[in-house]
Amino acid sequence: MINQNHLSTKKIRTLLCVLLALNVLVSNGENSKNTSTPPIFKLDTLNAYQMNEVSVYGQKKKNTTIGKSGISEMDLPQAITVIDSKLLEVQQVSSVTDLLKNVNGVYIMGNSGGYQEEIASRGTNITTTNTFKNGIRYYGGMKTEMSGIEKAEILKGSAALLYGNVAAGGILNLVTKKPVFNFGGNVTMTYGSFDQYKPSFDVYGALNKQKTIAFRLDGSYEQANSFRKGVESKTYYLNPSVLFNIDSKTTLLVEGDYTKDNRTPDFGAGIINYQIADLPRDRFVGVSWGKYNSEQTFLSAKATHKFNDNLNISSLTGLRYYNTDLFSNSRPNTSGSMIASNGDWTRNIQRSSVDDNYFIEQVDLNANFNTWFIKHQFLVGADYESYTTKTTSYNSYTGYDAINIFENYNAANEPAQPALTKNTLTTNPVDRFGIYAQDLLTLHRYFKLLMGVRYSDIKSSTDVYTYSSSATVKTPAHDRPFSPKAGIIFQPTNNNTLFATYSNSFSLNTGVDINGNALDPSIVDQYEVGVKNKLFDNKLALNLTAYQIDNSNLAQTSLENGNTNSNIKELAGATRGRGLEVDIEYSPLKNLHIMGGYSYTKTTYTKSNTYVVGSEMRYNPKNTGNISLNYSFEKGFLKNLQAGFISSYIGERYAGRSTRVTVANDTYKLIKLNDYLQHDIMLAYKLKNWILKAKVNNVTNVMSYNVHDDNSLNPIAPISYTINVGYHF
């Protein structure tokens, strides 16, 4: 058993040695002749995008777009998880929270305001820079509609070489439904707890007799209340796409994706002196007229041309726009809005809005070739990203009213909605250009080497306009980081891989130094070792990964000259994260699929001018785990019935505020959040063209919270259900 308080390098080496010995034993008697060759990209023009749907049942090869170069799973010296359309359908996944119940070490670290799902991987927040849809960065600060998603790809660890400015924990790429040349589709209606109504549709087919043009159009509308009294939401979603097979070697895929989400913001309440108060789970204490309106639009075109079996090129052009408007009560326990020990709380009012325009152009060239005895799977590419984010903040309205969080809330007593004046407009233009090259070299039947590097040129600025003074303060920055990566792969058989990888990434910093200059990026080094196995005729996949992530120059508030302005910073901190991940997929029978995993992560401050050295980073559970079972009945009176079960575990974690070493008699404290184990069950029955589905979430009604600092406490949802009726044509 791994000691949960310490994961030493010696233990990692010992564990890897044991697994290597097991590899040799298990592989004995199997075909050990290595006949693998570098994967060749082959584009079937009639089915190029239909092939994105790949079943995990039976451990078939997983086609992914996240790696850009088509490197096979066994050749990739990195942990990867693919959740395909079949699993999404069986588990009736309706949110990112549902999705991540299948992925250990990647979890929801918070849902501040109740309108977003903040994602973390390996102890790092990946919500802002590391979430993608069809390879284009998407904004994670709003609801992610899952009805149009056919596959989710999670690449753990560093992806800076391929994607530039991304955090070290990993990336999530959601792949939307693609056109199909055979006509078909479905219409569905979902009803659920808390007055949830959700009609949806999906239709696809060819647009011409030659079947060289195909389309797909899916969409949904959802209206729901919440287990929190007074909280409601409406979501509109539309996902059109068209595929052109221009000739036998060239395709063009044009896609759109639109989400509009309006909901009641809910920052919760009930933290008094860093203790969670005992309140009813359904108690909402926000203003009744509060709103969080968000809208996000994508438009992309991806062209692919195959010169021959060993050479192809692709180009991706994408546009994205989002805007949000938050108008609600201020968070509890913010300045001037503390909750008293008896529950009295004077509420303030806040407002902010964000507009963002984003453009990306990306070109990738993949080539397979030989130089003497060395086989190459080569990728070279370039990308350009340009976006401008405008954030308008309003002057807060103090002393709106006074309530007591222990008393039932009566919205009829609210004063009128106030009018707020604008305070500042912050404009953040960013132009990022990158070039990168990567090569998978097959040196020997047992050994491969992955090498690559990216160069990025990033010009950015933070321009703050203050309405009261009509003055603008600009802080420009120009960064030119390199992001190298190197991995060694040892494959004693086709079904066994051992690897070791080094990579680094960078994180752009906000704020200025003591001289008013922009801060340099923080450089993060990552070391990863692992074992991948496909056993028992590929019915079992068993993978183990251990890693260490070092951020040696973390930005923290500068202490020079007695400074207390948190916007003035220095690269004075350092953190270290260590972890272990185990992933298992097993299909002992054609109609039975089992998936599970366990992760251990510990991230601490190793150097700090502000916090206690050795203290752990907040929000991150040391232990997470998951197991799911899906079974399809093929005979008897239960024929056409599918049953599923999933359990997910989130270990003990802390919120609150980290203790400061720079403040005498510091009042900051951490808030302990207990671990919890949650279970969901699902059923589906097919009858000709009809399918009836039912799901029960959190069947044991376990209680826990997501907490941001000490000012946004959101209980997880209680036991709930959904019933879905669909007709397929």
Image: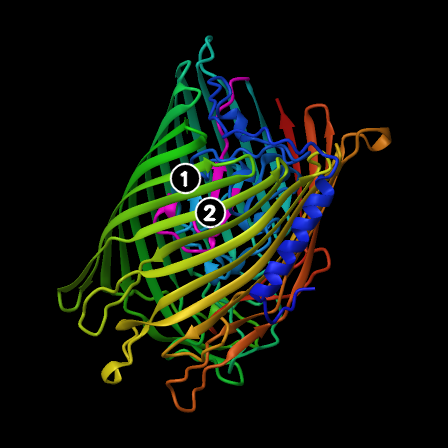
Looking at the image, tell me whether mark 1 or mark 2 is earlier in sequence order: 1
**Quadrant in which residue 26 is drawn:** top right
Whether residue 343 appears in magenta in the rendering, the answer is no
Mark 1, residue position: 135
Q: In this view, which residue lies farthest toward the top?
A: 209
Disc 1 from disc 2: Cα separation: 23 Å
Mark 2, residue position: 487
Q: Residue at x 59, y 50 (%)?
A: 103
* Local secondary structure at mark 2: strand
Q: In this view, which residue lies farthest toward the right?
A: 636
Tell me if residue 682 can be seen. Answer: no
Residue 113 is labelled as none
**On the rendered image, what quadrant is the C terminus found in?**
top right
Query: Which span of residues is magenta-colored?
Result: 153-182
**507, 264: nearer the viewer:** 507
Residue 223 left/right relative to 640: left
**On the rendered image, what quadrant is the N terminus found in?**
bottom right
The amino acid beneath tag 1 is Gly
